[in-house]
Image (cartoon, rainbow, N blue to C red):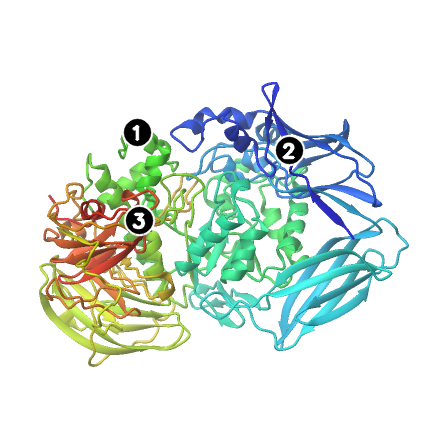
Amino acid sequence: MLQATPLTEGWILRHEGGELPAVVPGCVHTDLLAAGAIPDPFLGRNETDLAWVGRRDWTYETELSPVDGHEQTDLVFDGLDTVAEIHLDGRLLGRTRNMHRSYRFDVTGMSGRLTVRFVSAYAEAEAVRGKLGERPAAYAEPYQYLRKMACSFGWDWGPTLVTAGIWRPVRIERWSTARIARVRPLVTVEQGVGVVELAVEVERARVEAPLWVEASVGGVRAIASLDGTEGVVRLEVPDVGLWWPRGYGEQPLYDVELTLQHEGRPLDVWRRRVGFRTVELDRSADAHGTGFTLVVNGERLFARGVNWIPDDVFPSRITRERYRERLGQAADAGVDLVRIWGGGIYESEDFYDACDELGLLVWQDFPFACAAYPEEQPLRGEVEAEARENVVRLMPHPSLVLWNGNNENLWGFRDWGWEARLAGDSWGEGYYLGVLPRVVAELDPTRPYTAGSPWSGSWEHHPNDPAHGTHHSWEVWNREDYAEYRGEVPRFVAEFGWQAPPAYATLARALPGEVLAADSPGVLHHQKADDGSGKLRRGLERHFAFPEGDFDRWHYLMQVNQARAVAAGIEHWRSHWPVCAGTVVWQLNDCWPVTSWATIDGDGREKPLYHELRRLYADRLLTVRMRGRKLVLAAVNQAAEPWAEVLRLRRMSVDGEVIDEAELNFRAARRTVTDVTVPPELVPVGPKEFLVADAGGDGGIDRKTATGTGRGSATGTGSAMGTGSATGTGSATEASAAPEAGAAPEAGAGSEAGASRDASVGPGMGMGTGADTAADRGHGSGTEAGAGPDRDTSTGTGTGTGADTAADRGHGSGTEAGAGPDRDASASTGTGTGADTAAGTEAGAGPGRDARLRPDGVRAVYFPAADREIPYPRPEFDVAVAPGSVTVTARTLVRDLLLQADRLDPAARADRGLVTLLPGERVTIGVSGWKTPDPDAARSALYCLEPSR
């Protein structure tokens, strides 16, 4: 039987004539850091001082002891980063030049000093560039000249830390007679029967030995003989359980085992888990252009997605537990699709295992991004070899549903001036339209392939044409206000987003000793986007007065703006299902502490956008839209059951007065969108009025709510403004079924915020908005962005009682009344209470009353005017603190209330983000990781919108 022995002990790294202990898997930077030879590159501006590391050659060494007892011994590297020579006892075993491949060397009968010498990635890239000629790229670094993780050379959200090292496991394998070289599993469903076809390839030590393979799955077994070095075994599993994406069904996984045998003796074994499902990509032409809709098990999906970048600029540090945590966060936010972006890597098995279990669909880019890639040798052979290896490696995973050729390179060729500069030189088209689709069709015909993102399907249309295929929306953020998202209905939005700084505690840790300011040296260094600070400011000033000299206010408002921007896009595009069939937010995560588009920052803390995403990606969403000249409520129902509710509409003033109200019945069929026209008398007029819409509330008492009157509680009074939730029952409804896909996009109107409906996520109030963002991210006309909330969670323990009053919470007095109109209607967006514990008191109820929406209530709040024009009252609210919670009761309108839990304690987290409360409503925010609850501290960590000054 094949025996594998990890080779992890005894490695050293040669440095300055000496030896440093090395960790394998790992890389040079992490070994130098562990030895105290370099400072932490994530802190301050240390990154710049460490540029020398990537420009040096490095050598790893260990001793390989003699082994015997088998006919053959192999040295196996699962990953070498990147250009290396491997010697054993002074003999050259081989050379490598691809981070994305594994390598195997025959070392039978050999032992002695094992040396892996890495050449600087810069030296190799510059040599290839000298041989093949200059190729244009979005950034000045030479990442397109070698097969290495592109973003290690820096990106508009990442540091330039060019790595080298043995980044994936290494082992010794000893075997006799034969071993399994490759198993290619084709997993399909045929008329309810699960089919697994295993194409097996073996390597032989003895050519003449007869070989058999025995396979099993789901209680079914099959045996086949091998002809030479290849064979196929087929298994059929009756009444198989289908694997579904999260929210659509279960995720049953089946163990597959294949054993290679000779004369009844096992020689090697291959084990994987598979799931049975079908996947198609509907790219049919229709009246609106060319579609791009994923179909799983016959069910058409609106993909609720996020873009994924490497979770650490040093990927060898990412553990199985970290993958599970980050992807679990995505699933808890309502995400059902994760796109692995093309400037990163093919992720480890741990990533795809987690997605299989969580029901997260995976869109896998081949690693090409934002550059023209030469198609000549030595790169061409490496590209095909890596594609063949990784396609087969990842085939068992049911979560993997789409192969994508590249990120933005087809677009770049057409729009970024590449065509003229290339003057006929190769640039990658042969990979995306030739090599890669051929490899996928040959090896993995069960999955669709698309040539790029964005891509319209052919050169007959512009590569980023929103009416055809995938679209990247980066004019918003780069040049336009997020209200412009409402100007078009793309078929599938594969990238869009807006920036915000990370959590306060993340910045404080990354910039020790620095007085934080929007333009302080460290804050600017940890902002990598081209004119990123300028775009942040201009984007904010369209809606709010810029808080000069007030870092805390700046930090809060930037995070509000990010959440509103992303909400503007998602609400609009979801309301146009099925013409628009997916949104993929740029981006879920960060690889270091930085101001970026991420939803979860580099320290793993959730930004407010994260909690807002829970509302936006819930199965059921209410959003206020302009359809032609009518104001409507779009009821988006992605659930498997019809949505029939009473809709309570209230036209209110910012002073808390209910001007008019009505109750309407509506019904949205499963997986559809239904429009409910707002009666003319309920349409808010002018900057003092707004609309509140609640579906599913019954005014019941939320048992999780606490007023802070017992032992261990403390109360205080503060101020804020926002809007809450309520319920009602009543009369006629206008249900204009799902808006015709592709119907003319709304020109403006306000934005709204509603309650999150995903009870699995925990209580959370989300803020809704209607605006757009565009990112130029410095590399041509488009880039990616993503945003996200502070990962607030805190557990409160402690006692202490007392009452405080804070009318103006010293830190939160900054101005907010915002700016530019939301597209045509100058509408402002608001926050709504989130599911689970959505606050839903009737306007005018006293502060002691605790009326609330039931957990599955959904809310939308719509302000027809821009924030700058709204005469918000000075926010007033009471604060009660108990172990594990902070309760806020609104005395006035409190808009976009946010508890920044990491200001209470760096380990603290809150279970919700932005929430708007009507007068008399209250919300209880769960807090973990806060050991000494204190009302003054809680009040100082609460932020909300305030009147303009």
Residue 871 rendering spot, x and y as whole percentages: 10, 53
User: What residue type is disc 1 on?
Assistant: Glu
- Tally of numbered tags: 3
Residue 778 rendering spot, x and y as whole percentages: 40, 38
* Image position of 166 (left or right of 541): right
User: What residue type is disc 2 on?
Assistant: Val
Q: Nearer the viewer, residue 830 or 858?
A: 858
Q: Nearer the viewer, mark 2 or mark 1?
A: 1
Q: Secondary structure at mark 2?
A: strand
**Extreme-top residue of the structure:** 17
Label 2 environment density (alpha carbons within 10 Å; few <14, some 14–19, many ≥20): many
* Image position of 530 (left or right of 345): left
User: What residue type is disc 3 on?
Assistant: Gln
| Gap between marks 2 and 3 measured at Cα | 40 Å
Q: Secondary structure at mark 1?
A: loop
Label 1 environment density (alpha carbons within 10 Å; few <14, some 14–19, many ≥20): some
Q: Secondary structure at mark 3?
A: helix
Q: Which residue is mark 3?
A: 562
Residue 514 - label: 1
C-beta proximity under 8 Å, tags 1 and 3: no
Which one is earlier in the sequence, the residue at label 2 or at label 1?
A: 2
Q: Nearer the viewer, mark 1 or mark 3?
A: 1
- Identify the residue at image location x=68%, y=46%: 385
Q: Which residue is mark 2?
A: 83
| Gap between marks 1 and 3 measured at Cα | 25 Å
| Gap between marks 2 and 1 measured at Cα | 39 Å
